[in-house]
Image: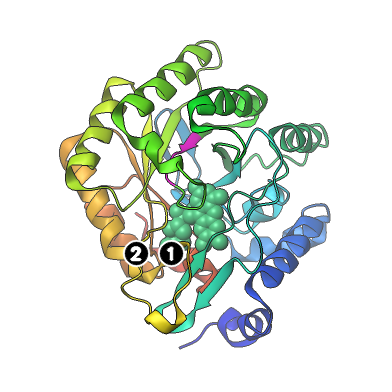
Amino acid sequence: MKNGYERFIRPVLFSLDAETAHNFTIALLRSASYVDPALRALSSFQSAPKPKTVFGVNFPNPIGLGAGLDKNGVALPAWAAMGFGFIEIGTVTAKAQPGNPKPRIFRFPDQQALINRLGFNNDGAEAIASRLRRLRESRRWPGNCRVGINIGKSRVTPLTEATEDYLCSFRLLRDFADYIALNVSSPNTPGLRELQEPTALSQLLRAIRDENQISARPILVKIAPDLSATELEEVIAVCEKSEVAGIIATNTTLDHSSIPPARDQAGGLSGVPLREKSTAFVRSIFARSKIPVIASGGISDAKSAREKFEAGAQLLQIYTGYIYRGPRLLRDIMETVS
Ligand SMILES: Cc1cc2nc3c(=O)[nH]c(=O)nc-3n(C[C@H](O)[C@H](O)[C@H](O)COP(=O)(O)O)c2cc1C
């Protein structure tokens, strides 16, 4: 049976172009973040806390909002009110950038999937750091929710200078983050995925670790589901050696075999068709390493959430499932969390 969001709100949002619907929703949640009665209304979706400590961070519950939904960190109080245990903002880049030409988000309701080629449109690390500082000073910073910050490379920065670009965002944003996720897996920034190659990844992680001596933030790496088995093993080995706190598995995929060719679009595919692949990655990492895994990819109901935990995930993130199922999805999943 369809829930209230699916019956009444989704049809309105889906009558709009995907990015317009996204911007409209974010604008509403941004406004709600400054209005106490609105936050109280949103908190009617909340479930009882189910705290869990992972890589030294105490999460009020293990279900988070995936990166890319609130790229600029404009609606933290609203997401927290809706009951997320953590929110990953970003991807943030050192330089503000507009992203790729529109249209750049496409819905595939039959597959419960999305394809996006946004290309890290965001306000840039400096503006986002100022916004987060203002939020903290306004005392509206959500105390009942952890905040991860996902950083990536600015498009104009050559791959050979990527480390400096990540360091710049890291320095500006670390004070606001319960963890920092290094995004080396978006398919929409040319060359970015090459940073998963062992030498490049080791170099990036070493530089971040040197810079992180005092701040001591947990550093996570977000990986692509399109790595071969050997490449995945290499990434795990580098993460172990570099004492990475966690791996986020996975980002969107370039495998579009589930999409009818006539409707296909360039970009990263997310949602139900990604589910099995990303679960297999979680299982592989869990079998080879003690590094905690945050599972991301195709979580669309309680069953697919349980599958990720059973594969070895410590925490989950949802994105495309939330677009299709709305706030009820979080409640459904929370009911299965022990
Ligand atoms: C429209 C859109 C934008 C996204 N932007 C980002 C991003 O900026 N950084 C990132 O690491 N992942 C991004 N993602 C990937 C999601 O965080 C998530 O890893 C992926 O969609 C798989 O989860 P899902 O199937 O639950 O959506 C984006 C996904 C979508 C659909």
The secondary structure that dominates the magenta segment is strand
First to last magenta residue range: 181-185
In this view, the residue in front, 294 or 256, is 256
The mark total stands at 2
Q: From the viewer's perspective, is 334 left or right of 230?
A: right
Is the C terminus in the top left, top right, bottom left or bottom right quadrant?
bottom left
In this view, the residue in front, 283 or 208, is 208
Q: Would residue 127 be counted in the magenta stretch?
A: no
- Which residue: 38% across, 29% down? 245
Residue 178, image x and y in percent? Answer: 55, 32
Asked if the residues shown at circle 1 and circle 2 are in contact, with their CB atoms under 8 angstroms apart, the answer is: yes
Q: From the viewer's perspective, is 203 left or right of 240?
A: right
Residue 118, image x and y in percent? Answer: 59, 57
Residue 26, image x and y in percent? Answer: 71, 61
Q: Is mark 2 within 8 Å of ligand 1?
A: yes
Q: Is residue 144 above or below residue 35?
A: above
In this view, the residue in front, 311 or 192, is 192
- Residue type highlighted by circle 1: Ser
Disc 1 target residue = 270
Residue 84 shows in the view? no
Where residue 274 is drawn, which disc sits there? 2
Measure the alpha-carbon separation of dots 1 and 2: 6 Å
- Which residue: 16% across, 42% down? 287
Q: Is mark 1 within 8 Å of ligand 1?
A: yes
- Residue type highlighted by circle 2: Leu
- Which residue: 69% across, 63% down? 42
Where residue 277 sits, quadrant-wise, is: bottom left
Q: Residues within 10 Å of mark 2 (few under 14, many from 20)?
A: many
Where residue 100 sits, quadrant-wise, is: bottom right
